[in-house]
Image (tube, helix red, strand yellow):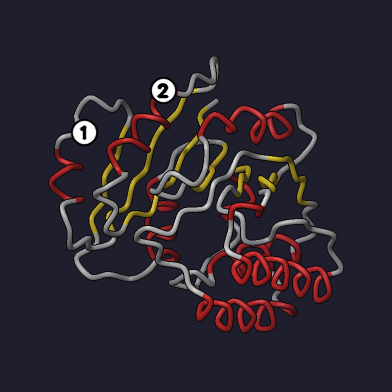
Amino acid sequence: MKLSIIMPVFDEAGTIAEILQRVSDVRLDPVEKEIVLVDDCSRDETPRILKEQTHIPNLKIITHEVNGGKGAAIQTALEHMTGEIVIIQDADLEYDPNDYAKLIAPIIRGEAKVVYGVRDLGTQKWFMALGNRFVTFVTNLLYGASLKDMETCYKTMAREVVQGLRLECRRFDVEAEITAKILRRGYRITEVPINYHARYEQKKLSPADGWPTLKALWKYRNWKG
């Protein structure tokens, strides 16, 4: 069995080498790993640093010539993944790849098709934590779910789930689209606690991204896969 770690990257020169090493260091035997990284037209030193990562095994690097956003990068990565399980990994250091084992375990055991990592939002600024809780509340209200953390980056899915999503959103609203379509297809989302520490240097997500997220949740409430 193989785990595909898809990593959208944009201007992450300060963290990209370290997160790649952390991901590479995780041992999941007998599960294999591949890293499918999409550089979304970075303008800093990220492209140069990526060229130096030849020591990272099973690393695929795809480059966008035009910046398309996180959703666009995820869509590209999904076209190149080959694993039976996929997880989304941000290119900063907020999330801990050592949590992969607990995220994929329910899928390997046949107990779930989708597993989300639930964050403790205590390290977030109050308005960001409030926004996260609000969009999760709206998700539960619109889709009859009982999620604790809709916006988590650590969304882990069996390949069959991913293949049916047909993603359209190109920016951060892709998180809402993924969740909405998973729920509309009738999958139950299993949640497990993960390690998380909020960062604010070079942070790209902002409160302004809340409105597109809410629009996506409304848009896909009647979606049929």
Residue at left offset 40%, top offset 53%: 79
Q: Name the image quarter holding residue 102.
A: top right
**Relative vertical location of residue 27 with respect to residue 85 in this rendering, above or below:** above
Residue at left offset 68%, top offset 61%: 150
Closest to the observer, 208 or 183: 208
Residue at left offset 62%, top offset 69%: 176
Q: Residue 30 location, x and y as percent?
A: 55, 15
Along the horizontal axis of the image, is 185 left or right of 44?
right
**Relative vertical location of residue 66 with respect to residue 192 in this rendering, above or below:** below
**Relative vertical location of residue 76 with respect to residue 154 in this rendering, above or below:** below
Along the horizontal axis of the image, is 106 left or right of 131?
right
Q: Residue 147 location, x and y as percent?
A: 79, 58
Which residue is most to the top? 29
Quadrant of the image for the N terminus?
Answer: top right
Quadrant of the image for the C terminus?
Answer: bottom right
Q: Which residue is mark 2?
A: 25
Q: Which residue is mark 1?
A: 53
Q: Name the image quarter holding residue 138.
A: bottom right
Q: Residues within 10 Å of mark 2 (few under 14, many from 20)?
A: few
Q: Amino acid at mark 2?
A: Asp
Question: Mark 2 and mark 1 in contact (Cβ < 8 Å)?
Answer: no
Q: Residue 212 location, x and y as percent?
A: 55, 81
Q: Amino acid at mark 1?
A: Gln
Q: Residues within 10 Å of mark 1 (few under 14, many from 20)?
A: some
Closest to the observer, 21 or 157: 21
Local secondary structure at mark 1 = loop
Local secondary structure at mark 2 = helix
